[in-house]
Image: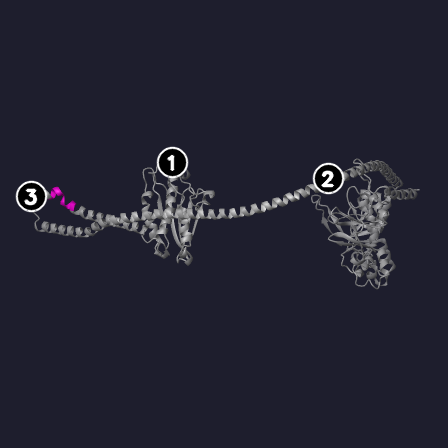
Amino acid sequence: MLQENLQHFLDSVPQLAIKTSEPPVEANSPPIYLSPLDRSIDRHPLTVAPETPIAKVLALMNPMRVSCQLCGEKQKGVPTPAKRSCVLVVEDSRPIGIFTERDIVKLTTLANCAIGLTIADVMTRSPITLTQSESQDIFTAIFTLRQHQIRHLPVVDEESRLIGIITREAIHEALQPVNLLTNLRCAADVMTKEVISAPKTASALDLAQLMVKHQSRCVVIVEDQIQHPQRIDKRENYPMPIGIVTERDIVQFHALELNLCQISAAEAMSAPLFCISPTDSLFRAHQSMQRHGVRRLVVVGSHGELLGVVSLTSLPQVFNQSEMYGTIELLQQAVDDRAAQLQKTNELLQQEILERQRAQEALRQAHDDLKKQVEERTAQLLESNELLRRDIIKRQRVEEVLRKKQTCLKNQAQQLEETVRKLQQTQSQLVQTEKMSSLGQMIAGIAHEINNPVNFIYGNLSHTSHYIKELIQLLDLYQKHYPEPASEIQEAAAEMEIDFLVEDLSKMLSSMQSGTERIRQIVLSMRNFSRSDQSNIKLVDIHEGLDSTLLILQHRLKAQGGHPAIHIIKEYGKLPQIQCCGGQLNQVFMNILGNAIDALDEEIHNGEWARRNGKNSPPSIPSSPLTLPAITIRTEVVGDFVAIRISDNGGGIPDEIRRQLFDPFFTTKPVGKGTGLGLSISYHLVVEKHGGRLDCVSEVGLGTEFAIEIPIVRSQLAVDS
């Protein structure tokens, strides 16, 4: 009766599945057979690459042909290789073909031609697959197999990667009530916990005595005991199983008339052991026994310790009639629910088909009407397109004429803009050159006028000093030979303080000589700065030009009232004389040093210097050299260039202003204080006239540095410019 009900259930499942491929499942009734579908998937199918030879594939499908054992001898514990009914051809983890036993039959007619072929030449391409998801159940797999008349169904994930394969035999095994029951039970439910064990040093006779004493059919051979990691406090040790000896082994030893006392447990035991976990299902335990051809499995823990034994005789204990009939009722209920869902789905499909037929009829009528409208509209558009085409041709001609005129005007505008720029630059250079020329002529005239009287004074000072020394010597002789002069002379000497007069007169002559020497140096510096031959190329001492420029600007560097002095820090290196226009370089030094002094003066005047350096005291109080306004001048030789770096410790220049420093007429100074031509002309003189480089490096709050690099030997290109 049980077999008839089960057969009726299996026959009814495919018939119900044929009505619709994937019936909708309500949200409150999840699929019941997800678990049987998972159990029916072989997750380790036989797979090969497309380039695998056919001979190798046939050997893999029928391993008995290449792994048969001589004389029917079977190795102990080694399972017989299983035959495979199909092979999946996989590329990048995705199935691209299948090769089954039916294909092998086809190959028998082409045996002579099959030599040298690969599996890709004979496989069935693009096999039917099943995508695994929560909505798929065992009924879907059965329907797919029947619909396509196939026996093997590969299972893939959402990215078409191979998961496993489903066969008709696997579905049949998964749907057996016994399998359902065994999958609900685990090995821990039926295992024998009281296991008889013995060390590997015991003899076979000792093992037989233990079997008789405890009425046991087997003895588990264990080795050195270990402590259970989770029960260290209880100091309990668990044995590690390494083999097993059964009654059948003792009987064989006895039949061979072996001395049981001389056979150790290590020699008599069957190894290796076939073990399972206590959480493994009874179905898995049954499969393991059949696969390995044994009647007992040892149950071990997570660390390999012995927990119990499951034997073949203990499995039928779970197969009672009540549980089997309960399972059949559960399956019958599932079939009834599924049939009701299918019936309801069929009714909805019929209604949807009728509605779609009506919609198709309405669409057909609308299509005819739309076709007429489209034809009429197309005729109108063709006429409009012709008019537009003519209009476009006319406009293209006009645009071409306008484009040519625009190009011509653009070229003229660019030429005019370039001409204006050159004129502005030339004008600014002429203005600045004339300014510097007038300034040089004025300074040269002043120096010439001052030089004549200074030379007269300087030339007579030596004679005057000589005359005074002689008069003093004469006076000393009078005092020596006439120590007691007349009273009138003594009174006059006392009134004149002759001793102080003689001593102070020497000091006065020395001061006058130092002053005239200083005036001569100032005049010489003024003449050097205002060279009349400033357009000529000659060897020039850079340090001499810097000192002359600083002398001209000396009055702006001194302290005045509440304005502190600006210190000049000279860090001169050893420089050779270079070929350049000395007057033009002096003009560059004057512009850059003047801008540095202007920046420091503006900060001091606005109070920014005091706030930035934390000064609240009056300028008369001495300050640290690091917090005083200063300009540093460094010179050095860099390769074939002489580098002059002029830096200040002011507030720095923002990037948006620094990028425009060398543009003509760009200035940040108020009207009347700057023209915006100084740095532009300096850039022109350094870069274009001398073939050098002029850069500005600045950071807000950390000061500004102008780096000037002049070639030691002037290039021909710079000379021509």
Identify the image quadrant of the C terminus.
bottom left
Residues under numbered marks 2 and 3 in contact, where contact means CB atoms less than 8 Å apart: no
In the rendered structure, which disc, 2 or 3, sits on the residue that comes first in sequence?
A: 2
Task: Check disc 3 and report its element: helix, strand or loop.
Answer: helix
Residue 677 visible somewhere in the drawing: yes
Task: Check disc 1 and report its element: helix, strand or loop.
Answer: loop
Q: Which SS does the magenta portion mostly show? A: helix
Q: Which of 383 and 667 lies nearest the eye of the viewer?
A: 383
Name the front one of labels 1 and 2. 2
Looking at the rendering, which quadrant does residue 347 occupy? top right
Task: Check disc 2 and report its element: helix, strand or loop.
Answer: helix
Mark 3 and mark 1: span between their CA atoms? 65 Å
Looking at the rendering, which quadrant does residue 20 occupy? top right
**Which residue is tagged 1?**
616
**Which residue is tagged 3?**
487
Q: Residues within 10 Å of mark 3 (few under 14, many from 20)?
A: few
Q: Is residue 319 left or right of residue 51?
A: right
Q: Residue 346: give x, y in percent of width and height.
A: 85, 38
**Which residue is tagged 2?**
377
Q: Residue 166: give x, y in percent of width and height.
A: 82, 49
Mark 1 and mark 2: span between their CA atoms? 88 Å
Residue 193 visible somewhere in the drawing: no
* 521 in the magenta segment: no
The range drawn in magenta is 493-501
